[in-house]
Amino acid sequence: MVDEILEAAGLGQVAASRRDVDGESVIVLEAGGDGQQMWDRVRAAVPTHYPVLVHDLDFALDRDYFEFSDADAPHAPADLMVRAETIDVDARIAAVSAGRPPVDPGTGDESYDLNAYDVAPYGPPEGMVLLPRPEPWAAFAYLPSFAVAGPYEPELLVAAARRWHQRYGAEPMVVGFATGFVVPRPPADLADAERLAAEHDFFAGLTVGQTTQRAYARALLRLDHWTLFDRP
């Protein structure tokens, strides 16, 4: 099965192995050369296994991150995917945000730098993980994202990523020290972009960078990629 997948993507020469993730098997590949080109090839050729580039393979397979979930709830990827289906994303974000200091969103007239929202400066990927399912948002049920770790259940991010995919076609390409998405359908109007900017700011508070939330929203109107970034 692994050989067939690699051959389909033209990666038959790439070293690969299987790893266990809470009872499910993922395929781990060594990344070499152009990571985005590798991702594009696998994404196009292997519709049954969603590919994710990772900055650090050891961290990518560490399940401790998922302890933010209810301690009594199972943390296997399939369980997180099921619970994500039941989450009201807006209500849960509002509930968690109520315990945080208020955010000044700015006026929107502040300057922003489109070049500041690229995942490449966070370093080359060490490997690629092929998930045993096709849904892009499943990446956050299998792989910890250091960039968006927070005091909320990880299935909330799964649910939000699912909604981003439905609305904007957003697909996580890199998960690790920063989380990079490709976005074929950016928000088309400012109100939608401002709602999205607030969501990004909620999950990864350093994403906005050296500007304001509303200015970042104006950048989102023009970006075909996102980079979510934070530090615990």
Image (spheres, rainbow, N blue to C red):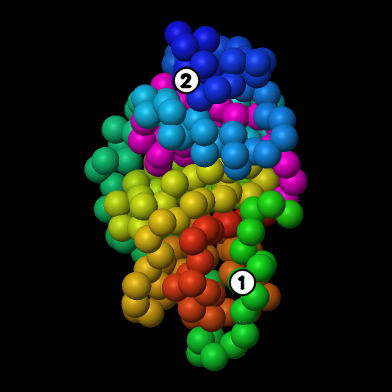
Hey, what amino acid is under mark 2? Answer: Ala
Q: Residue at the spot x=64%, y=38% of the render?
A: 35
Q: Residue at the spot x=65%, y=75% of the render?
A: 113
In the image, residue 26 sits, relative to residue 40, either above or below, namely above
Number of residues whose C-alpha sits closer than 10 Å to that of mark 2, classed few (under 14), some (14–19) or many (20 or more): some
Inspect this view and state whether residue 102 appears. no
The picture places residue 125, in percent across and down from the top left corner, at 69, 37
Asked if the magenta segment contains residue 229, the reply would be no
Q: Nearer the viewer, residue 157 or 71?
A: 157
Query: Residue 8 bears which disc, if any?
Result: 2
Q: Nearer the viewer, mark 2 or mark 1?
A: 2
Hey, what amino acid is under mark 1? Answer: Leu
For the record, the magenta segment spans 122-143
Name the residue beneath numbered marker 1.
114
Q: Residue at the spot x=67%, y=46% of the render?
A: 177
Q: Viewed as shown, does residue 160 lie left or right of 17?
A: left
Q: Nearer the viewer, residue 82 or 94?
A: 82
